[in-house]
Image (spheres, helix red, strand yellow):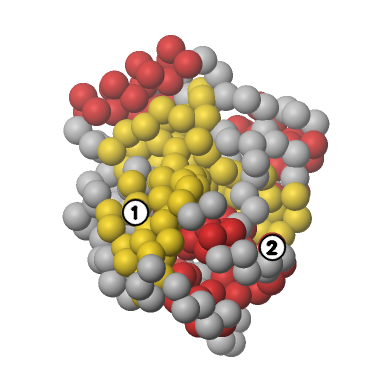
């Protein structure tokens, strides 16, 4: 096929713990990753001239080599010395710099897309090994689903999916740099650690209350201090009926978990009315 569309799904973290800072500056993490239904679309088309051409409806993103899509495409095409070219058209829906791995997911979709378009024959494990050089979340994004992610994010163990429910995902109008959050985290002096093992047990038992009771993210210790709007959003979502709410990744996106669709929609409207966030989506967990 000379052209096709692939979806790049966003993720949330229902648990995020940082164990320590390694000598090389990376942090050793223990996170539970979950794909959600919110996604970008990437259209891949072969071009008869060589090169990588990126187009997007999103004015905030670069369309040159700084975009993770171009970096991923360049990596694969160089490796296999591809002589043809590719045009990639990105329809962006995942909030940017949000803690939802939008860029990593686009990069992962690009790796799958080019592997298929140019029949490169890479296995998923090979793509993961190449992808981690571009971003620690890319190995996960190449497979998605519910995963325990350890190491710097490259050691992945599949987990059972949580029970079906509805999510309100809200990004306040601030951009939080992942580097700032990790740079200001004092991993060695953290007094609180989320109960990741308990969360794994709750997932295995299909116990939604066990899961929502254990939502936890150590990166909130940095972001909430800097941006109190994150805590305000969590409180609003809980007041509107969320079983619980948490910041995803390095933030600032907050998600609330709801058992009822109607309640989730009412909560999303309440968030918009409050002015605490403008980018608000109702979505669900996505099974891969
Ligand atoms: P993570 O959860 O992995 O930390 P994030 O959701 O916080 O990711 P991204 O949306 O992936 O953050 O964007 C981080 C930075 O990467 C942005 O500043 C953006 O300019 C840059 N970037 C490059 N390519 C992309 C892309 N295709 N989509 C989004 N951001 C991109």
The answer to whether any part of residue 131 appears in the image is yes
The residue tagged 1 is 89
Left or right: where 239 falls relative to 143:
left
Q: Secondary structure at mark 2?
A: helix
Give above or below for 77 relative to 32.
Answer: below
Give above or below for 252 relative to 111.
Answer: above
Left or right: where 109 falls relative to 55:
right
Give above or below for 246 relative to 222.
Answer: above
Residue 82 vs residue 57, the one in the foreground = 82
Q: Position of residue 212 (x, y in %)?
A: 60, 33
Q: Residue furthest front?
A: 48
Q: Are marks 2 and 1 in contact (CB under 8 Å)?
A: no
Task: Please give the name of the residue rendered at 37% of the width and 32% of the height, measured from the top-left corner.
Answer: 281
Left or right: where 206 falls relative to 72:
right
Kindly indicate the quadrant of the structure image that contains residue 187. bottom right
Kindly indicate the quadrant of the structure image that contains residue 120. bottom right
Q: Confirm if mark 1 falls within 8 A of ligand 1.
A: no
The residue tagged 2 is 124
Task: Please give the name of the residue rendered at 65% of the width and 53% of the height, measured from the top-left corner.
Answer: 143
Q: Secondary structure at mark 1?
A: strand
Task: Please give the name of the residue rendered at 34% of the width and 43% of the height, measured from the top-left corner.
Answer: 93
Q: Which mark is residue 151?
A: none
Circle 1 Cα neighbour tier, 10 Å, few/some/many (<14 / 14–19 / ≥20): some
Mark nearer the N terminus (2 vs 1): 1
Q: Position of residue 4 (x, y in %)?
A: 48, 48
Give above or below for 239 relative to 10.
Answer: above
Q: Position of residue 94 (x, y in %)?
A: 38, 46
Numbered marks: total: 2
The answer to whether any part of residue 17 appears in the image is no
């Amino acid at each position: 096929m000379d052209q096709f569309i692939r979806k790049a799904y966003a993720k949330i973290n229902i648990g995020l713990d940082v164990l320590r800072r390694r000598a090389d500056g990376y942090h050793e993490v223990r996170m539970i990753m979950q794909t959600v239904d919110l996604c970008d679309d990437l259209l891949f088309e072969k071009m008869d001239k060589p090169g990588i051409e990126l187009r997007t409806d999103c004015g905030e993103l670069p369309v040159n080599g700084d975009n993770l899509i171009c970096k991923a495409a360049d990596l694969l095409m160089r490796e296999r010395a591809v002589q043809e070219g590719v045009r990639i058209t990105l329809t962006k829906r995942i909030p940017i710099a949000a803690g939802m791995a939008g860029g990593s997911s686009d990069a992962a979709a690009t790796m799958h897309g080019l592997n298929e378009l140019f029949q490169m024959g890479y296995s998923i494990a090979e793509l993961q090994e190449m992808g981690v050089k571009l971003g620690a979340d890319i190995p996960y994004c190449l497979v998605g689903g519910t995963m325990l992610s350890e190491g710097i994010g490259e050691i992945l163990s599949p987990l059972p999916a949580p029970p079906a429910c509805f999510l309100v995902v809200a990004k306040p109008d601030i951009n939080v740099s992942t580097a700032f959050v990790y740079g200001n985290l004092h991993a060695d002096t953290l007094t609180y650690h989320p109960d990741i093992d308990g969360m794994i047990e709750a997932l295995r038992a299909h116990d939604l209350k066990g899961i929502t009771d254990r939502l936890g993210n150590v990166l909130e210790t940095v972001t909430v201090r800097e941006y109190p709007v994150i805590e305000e959003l969590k409180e609003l979502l809980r007041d509107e009926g969320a079983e619980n709410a948490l910041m995803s990744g390095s933030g600032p996106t907050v998600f609330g978990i709801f058992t009822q669709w109607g309640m989730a929609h009412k909560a999303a409207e309440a968030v918009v009315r409050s002015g605490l966030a403008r980018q608000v989506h109702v979505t669900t967990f996505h099974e891969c």
